Structures are given as structure tokens and as C-alpha cells.
Image: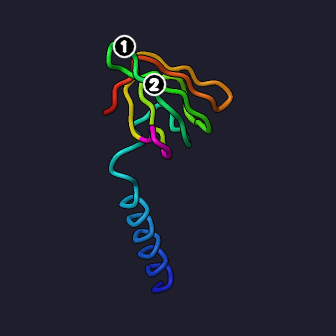
Amino acid sequence: MKASSLAAALSAAALTAMLSAVPAQAAASDAVCFSGGRTLNANGTYKVNAGGCDGYSGTTVTIRFGYAAGDYKCGWTFLWNSQLGADNCVIT
């Protein structure tokens, strides 16, 4: 009887530990890219191109490395075969 009680207690403790390990905030970006570049548009927004991307076409982009590293909110994005193109982006 004690072995089953110990097993139940350990299972409950393991479940509690797993649930508390869930990140407090999910990834905020629709697309996350390894590296990329940006060009300033005449209206003060950026045109962003990036490679090594994962995710989907949406409005938010994260670039991890390089001079354009950061988070962007864009007017439009297009993601295809790990390549991203986006325009009307602002740094968030």
C-alpha cells in the first residue's frame, strides 16, 4: 500500500512540475527568422527581407541575428520556403 501511495505522490509532483514549467508567454511573432535585413521606406517604415524563417505569413516578425535583429509589426508579410518578405514594418 505504501508503494502505491508513493507512486501517486511522485506522479502528482511530476505533473505539478511540468505544469509550472509552461512559459508565461507564448512566442509573440507569426514568423521567426534566423537573420535578415531592412531598408528604410520614404514613409519611415521598413521593408524587411529575411531567411531561415519558420512560422507563417502574418503581421509580426522576429529576426534573431544581424543588424536587423529585433521585433517588427508589419503591414504585410509573405513567407515561402523559409524566405520572408515584409513591408510597412515598424520596430516594436
Quadrant of the rendered structure where residue 6 is? Answer: bottom left
Q: Relative to 72, does residue 11 appear above or below in the rendering?
A: below
Judging from the image, the colouring scheme is rainbow
Please name the amino acid that badge 1 sits on.
Ala
Residue 1 position in % (x across, y down): 48, 84
Tell which residue pokes out farthest to the right in this image. 81
Tell me what residue is drawn at x 43 percent, y 62 percent.
18
Q: Which mark, residue 42?
A: 1
Mark identifier at residue 39: 2
Taking depth in this image into account, of 76 and 65 the one nearest to the observer is 65
Crowd band around label 1 with a 10 angstrom C-alpha radius: few (<14), some (14–19), many (20+):
few
Q: Which residue is painted at 56% across and 20% down in the image?
A: 78
- 79 drawn magenta: no
Query: What are the residue bounds of the magenta stretch?
Result: 64-69
In the depicted view, which residue is nearer to us: 60 or 17?
60
Count of picture labels: 2
Q: Is residue 63 above or below residue 3?
A: above
